[in-house]
Amino acid sequence: MDMSTPLGRGPRMKLVMVGNGMAGVRTLEELLKLAPDLYDITVFGAEPHPHYNRILLSPVLAGEQTVADIVLNPLDWYKENGIALHLGKKVVKIDRTARVVETGDGTRAGYDRLLLATGSEPFILPVSGAGLEGVIGFRDIADVDAMIRASSAYKHAIVIGGGLLGLEAANGLMKRGMDVSVVHLGPWLMERQLDEPAARLLQQSLEARGMRFLLQKQTGELVAGPGGRVAAIRFKDGSEAPADLVVMAVGIRPNTTLAESAGLHCNRGIVVSDTLQTVTDPRIYSIGECAAHRGIAYGLVAPLFEQARVAANHLAQYGIGRYEGSVTSTRLKVTGIDLFSAGDFLGGEGTETLLYSDPIGGVYKKLVIKDDKLVGGVMVGDTVDGAWYFALLRDGKDVSGLRDHLMFGQDHCGNLGHQGHHRAAGMTDDMEVCGCNGVCKGDIVKAIREKGLFTLEDVRKHTKASSSCGSCTGLVEQILAFTAGGDYSAAPKKKSVCGCTDYTHEDVRAAIRNNKLLTIPQVMTFMEWRTPDGCASCRPALNYYLLSTWPGEAEDDPQSRFINERAHANIQKDGSYSVIPRMWGGITTPAELRRIAEVAEKYAIPTVKVTGGQRIDLLGVKKADLPKVWADLDMPSGHAYGKALRTVKTCVGSEWCRFGTQDSTQMGIDLEKVFFKMWAPHKVKLAVSGCPRNCAEVAIKDVGIIGVDSGWEIYVGGNGGIKTEVAQFLVKVKTPDEVLEYVGAFLQLYREEARYLDRTVHYLERVGLDYVKQRVLDDADNRRALYERLLFALSVEKDPWVERAKEGKLAHEFETVIA
Amino acid sequence: MNHWIDILAVADIPRPGARVVRHADIDIAVFRNAEDNIFALEDRCPHKGGPLSQGIVHGKKVTCPLHGWNVELDSGCAAAPDEGCAREFPVRIEDGRVWLDLTAIGRATA
């Protein structure tokens, strides 16, 4: 063996993986994506099966799936990727000096890098009779086979341990026709995930299915029958119960025997660093249930996958990414029972508890709040919002504004979406899950099974479900949990701009500002983009960040804009375009209307429609006609196609209306003229009403203004789309000039700080209204500076329609080559 | 018999971007990527017929403007997990000009 091979050069290095489970194989998959040719890979698996989804053993036991269904990587996968697979071979020795592992039958393999993914083993109670026939754990396919065999020959099953695994085992055995009792030491079930009321509710619904419980019972011994097989369980209090099968599900312990024998430091797991390398030997990595990271050995899939990503990154010699621990949540996979638990669900000193309890309806929800943040929760019976709560918890969002509605879930916090169904389990395959893309439950289940999907992201890519408005995300996650098992919802805490980089939107903006980057290639080089010229997600974002940070200096890159902003019209489903000319404040004239009518006839425009924002839409314009249409209209660009200032909707106000207190129309015209041509992270809609009757519906606009007798009230962050959100009161001012300055300052703050494609509502949700008040209200100098920066940025913008209709700019965009 | 036609100068295609070429009532998108590779595909996304020529070009892919499918420029096929292909046409570059082999269309319309 060549010990001096330099990294990344010469012959391929050797990677040996001990363990063929979910964490380990995931690492290999991630590694093969990053560096397919770096290693010769050898895998040792103690079980005789290829990589399967261990979480789905419960449904296999319950007869809902088969072993074949849960295989994730068939033998062909190993072959195709050139992986030498040794099944049924247990590694018993690691020689760290010679860098060789050896199996029980004498097979040896040398390594440059070693990955220990030995997982865990069930903890077997040290009681008399624990070694009898018929006493098993619940860990692998062999255990499931043993249980299935027992269920056809015997009657009485005892499951010791009323935790997640124990209940799933008990449920499966019950489905197989056995008479099942769950023995539990604690006063209630799943005490590590549930509080007492939730556990009682769960117990009731399991009892209704025929499961029996022996709580607060301590196992004394297991008693053999005449044939030597276990026949009964005897408790410390002297009572007894018949038992032909005993499943021990009292906990797992990390499988560290091999690591310990090799002298690797272990303390409730193989101790690893944030790069998943063992602290003893940096050539050796360990991940999964056998590894102890910052004192925790994780047993859920989401954290293991996060670990896998980091470990693969380091194995691939990229050397970026650290694993910093995970917040976990739990779902129970007992078909028909919805249960969710996360974080500190018990609460205590300094916490507040929101409680909803409907014992008849079988619903119990508890949310624990500390310092205006959600820190934990438990739900039984209605878990559709589990993913949403978990996201709030993980992101540490301020929930003070949501408090009143928090308990009733996301749908009641303004998210209209389509209301649809709440319980995935009760849905039939032909019921629609995603209303945007018409995806039914059956499609999703099929894709998850056939393509081996694991994450929400995977499901979105393959089925498009939940990829548009997102209101069915909770439902899709439930379906994932039931079909693929476990909780796959954990998204990274920091969201990168796109797959081309690990940097966040904030990182990119800071780099552009601090280093005065002026072009997209500069940003990509400076920030080491992974792709040569980005993708359709990052390029428009970068273009906007450059233009908004360096107005007048950074040059617009039309090729990095979505077609609507490149053609300055809205593309339609048939490839034609729509044109919406600007009408300041919604006011038009007979002459304009005549021109619009003539243009519609001259260019045979099939549809003329009034929009929701009080403008006129010409639909079905051929691209080649656009410059001529604009020239003939002789009206300013309405920017209805852009992430830009759209319209300012107005009511008629004091000029005509008998209730009007202010001239809202003129205010709207002024606002629209001042902020005309304003590009933004997303579209921006304004409205002005002349009295509190609010005919312009300002409460659902990014900025809404209501005229009252003594001045103007300014509201911000309203939204009328997927997520209906009522705007929040920002400030009341006296004069129209003040309105312009305050509104301008708010919009500039949003332009400078929001992530691309965030509406004002999302921006406000992230930074909070208090922050905006600080920057715009309390600090007058800052307000003026913001407003002036906006005015400067607008001063260098030109009307794109005029440029194209009259100055011939980018004429090729509208020309077809005839061949 | 091949049916090669001189179409336009490479320099007339925005980089990275596309131009639409119409031949016998069929729209063909002629792409130029950042590395000056030229590709020609029928201007119809395999998903719902969206005009690929209007999408953002990145690497060797274009993102359809209608629903965001990514289509590989050198094969015309949608990037996994989406499935389907747009018809591709052979391309030749001579003296800075793009030539297309439009035999396939010629035959269909002949």
Image (tube, coloured by chain):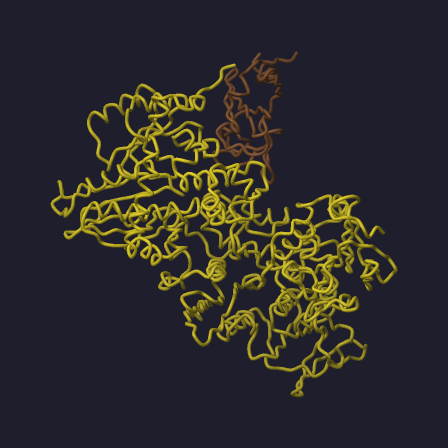
Question: Image check: A799 left or right of A427?
Answer: left
Q: Nearer the viewer, residue A575 or A203?
A: A575
Find residue A90 and report its horizontal and vertical position in percent: 80, 61
Up-down: is A1 above or below A251? above
Up-down: is A554 above or below A623? below
The answer to which quarter of the image holds residue A789 is: top left
Hey, which residue is sitting farthest left in the picture? A658
Up-down: is A150 above or below B48? below
Question: How many numbered circles does the render carry?
Answer: 0
Find residue A100 and report its horizontal and vertical position in percent: 83, 58
Residue at the image position 42 percent from the left and 60 percent from the top:
A409
Q: Nearer the viewer, residue A807 or A685?
A: A807
Find residue A433 and report its horizontal and vertical position in percent: 49, 49
Which chain has been coloured brown in this picture? B
Which chain has been coloured yellow in this picture? A
Find residue A248 and report its horizontal and vertical position in percent: 69, 73
Q: Nearer the viewer, residue A240 or A683?
A: A683
Q: Nearer the viewer, residue A753 or A553?
A: A553
Hey, which residue is sitting farthest bottom in the picture? A238
